[in-house]
Amino acid sequence: MSHVTTRRAALSVALSIPAAAAFAQAPGPQAFEPTAPGPNTPRPLPGERIIGRADAPVAVIEYHSLTCGNCANFHTTIFPRIRTTFIEPGLVRFVMRDFPLDRVALEAAAMVHCGGPERYEALISMLYANKESWAHSPDARAWLRRAGTLAGMPAERIDACMTDRGFTDLIAVMRLQGEREFGVSATPSFVINGQVHRGVQSFERFSALVRPLLPPGTAPRG
């Protein structure tokens, strides 16, 4: 059995998605049917989050897992400089997509999306800054519930987001689509104007990849 097949089988078990491996390997999307959101499924539903101008000349997609140490390092030490230099001036549209590596990462992503767009970036920053406190906790769900309530969400809403398959399946589908569309197999992975770059990108490496894609005469900050 290949490592890729093993990862996909493990994902199917860890995320409790019976057809995950079939979805990842089949030629068409019909092999995996996520649970449809019901009338009581929390809204808004999970989806990619876009940071920056929609018409920015460079599009960067990051596939990340909230239990990933390299992702935490990127977001706490490198991303703030990328934001100041490239995103805020309107040069880069930064798209965050979930690629949960385990059940805890899936529930953490559910809590983040549960807060809606207005809380998304603050919750992401808080979870990555405190990853060592919760990611390996024997009761990570309780930690996430407390963090969500401190952010202003009712505990019962957070529990619904974490347990409603109509909500969590959409997060898992983001991972599976990343595997199929770009061959993503680990986090973080970055897709910069269609080209895949795996692993943590230092600010200098990120800048070297982005600058040639900017329109002539465009200068980032710094």
Image: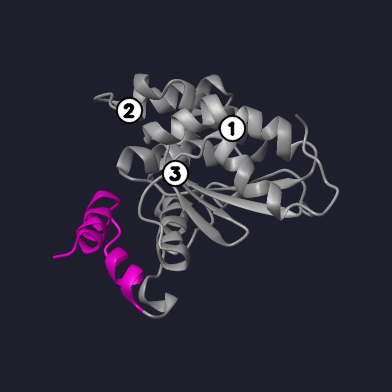
Task: State the residue position of label 3.
Answer: 188
The image's mark for residue 140 is 2
Task: State the residue position of label 1.
Answer: 79
Q: Is residue 175 above or below residue 187?
A: below
Q: CA distance from mark 1 to mark 2?
A: 25 Å
79 relative to 165 in the view: left or right: right
Quarter in which the C terminus is drawn = top right
149 relative to 144 in the view: left or right: right
| Of residues 129 and 14, the one drawn nearer to the viewer in this rendering | 129
Q: For the point 22% across and 64% down, which residue is it?
A: 5
121 relative to 40 in the view: left or right: right
Q: Position of residue 125 (x, y in %)?
A: 55, 27
Asked if the magenta segment contains residue 21, the reply would be yes
For mark 3, give the secondary structure.
loop
For mark 1, give the secondary structure.
helix
Among the two numbered marks 1 and 3 on one chain, the one whose residue lies closer to the N terminus: 1
| Of residues 113 and 11, the one drawn nearer to the viewer in this rendering | 11
Residue extending furthest toward the bottom: 27
Which of the 4 quarters of the picture holds residue 187? Answer: top left
Q: For the point 35% across and 55% down, which residue is it?
A: 185
Among the two numbered marks 3 and 2 on one chain, the one whose residue lies closer to the N terminus: 2
For mark 2, give the secondary structure.
helix
Query: Which segment did they paint magenta?
Result: 1-26
166 relative to 84 in the view: left or right: left
Q: Nearer the viewer, mark 1 or mark 2?
A: 1
Residue type at mark 3?
Pro
Residue type at mark 2?
Ala
